[in-house]
Image: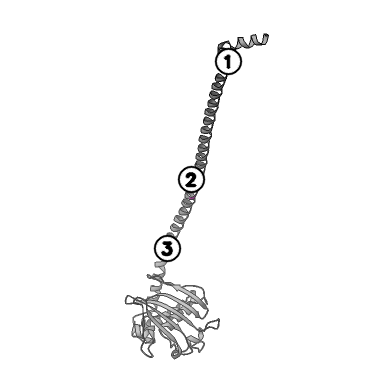
Amino acid sequence: MRINELHLQDFGMFHDYTISFDPQAQLIYGDNEQGKTTLMSFIMLMFYGDQGRNSKFNLTLRKKYLPWNGNKSAGTMTFISEGITYRIEKEFGGTQRTDRVRVLNLTEGKEVKLPDQEEVGQYFFHLDRDGFEKTGFISTVGAFDGDDKDQVTAQLVQNLAQTGDEDVSAEVVVKRLDDARFSLVSRNQKNGRLVDAQAQLTNLQDEQQATKELLAEQNQHVDDLKTLAKKRQKRDQLKEQLSKDAELRKTAQRQQLLNALVESKHKHQVLSQFPVAPSDISDFIQKAGIK
């Protein structure tokens, strides 16, 4: 079974809050009073509604995590079991009997009918709440530093002892914690999954910056091409206009030449009416003037 997503519509400090889990590994971390235990309690209540009472506050968890905004507690949880995706939709009442629960088989698109008085966890895991806590669910054990190490180690031993592993010892617990910590970051701070993740993040950031610069350069080239296209269009328009003007000038010159030829022909026709040869006209005009 693997949880894919939690949606806390109203639960404790959360309102309309969604958290999705990576299929490989999940790590929920944060400062105190930031909601880590609330998320764990939400998961448990989605599978098992009857939680008994909290020893510190003498409250059931459903009452301890009443929404701060005054609404009813409600939410959904999506998980995969045996290759099938399910979603639990739950609105919490004052008791387990007043809860409103729907279980949907998202893979096949149908609703799952639970037997009367049977919790979701019992239906899917065939375990009651106590069995689930001892095998498939370990609650928060706290954080420690300095002198608190022995106390918390003992608490870890107690939690692991509840799983039925009688060979667990405090030394084994500490070793497991150290191995887990060093798998994240080695002593020399040069190796580990977190170091690799940071290196990958740095590489991705560098690639992102290079992509942004390349995109900016490409955008500049596009702008330059657009500018050149506009200049070429203006040049073609000017060339076309010049060609039209030259054609007009040629047409005007042809018209002027034609007019001159018509006028010359007309003059020759007028002169041909006089009994004087065209070559003698000048002498004729001079003699006429004298007379």
In this view of the protein, which residue sits in the foreground, 233 or 174?
233
Q: Image quadrant of residue 104? A: bottom left
Dot 3: what SS?
Answer: helix
In this view of the protein, which residue sits in the foreground, 266 or 70?
266
Q: Are marks 3 and 2 in contact (CB under 8 Å)?
A: no
| Residue found farthest to the right | 290
Q: Amino acid at mark 1?
A: Phe
Residue 7 point in image, percent of width and height: 46, 76
> Image height check: is 195 above or below 272?
below
Q: For mark 3, what is the residue? A: 197
Q: Read off the magenta span.
A: 219-229
Neighbour tally class for label 2: few under 14, some 14-19, many 20 plus, Cα within 10 Å: few
Would you say 118 lies left or right of 211 here?
left
Q: For mark 2, what is the residue? A: 225
Q: For mark 1, what is the residue? A: 274
Q: Of callouts 2 and 1, which one flags the residue occurring earlier in the amino acid sequence? A: 2
Is label 3 or label 2 in front? 2
Q: Of callouts 3 and 2, which one flags the residue occurring earlier in the amino acid sequence? A: 3
Is label 1 or label 3 in front? 1
Give the CA distance from mark 3 to mark 2. Answer: 41 Å
Dot 1: what SS?
Answer: loop
Q: Amino acid at mark 2?
A: Leu
Give the CA distance from mark 2 to mark 1. Answer: 74 Å
Q: Amino acid at mark 3?
A: Ala
Residue lying at 44% horizontally and 79% vertically, measured from the top left? 76
Neighbour tally class for label 1: few under 14, some 14-19, many 20 plus, Cα within 10 Å: few
Residue 81 point in image, percent of width and height: 34, 77
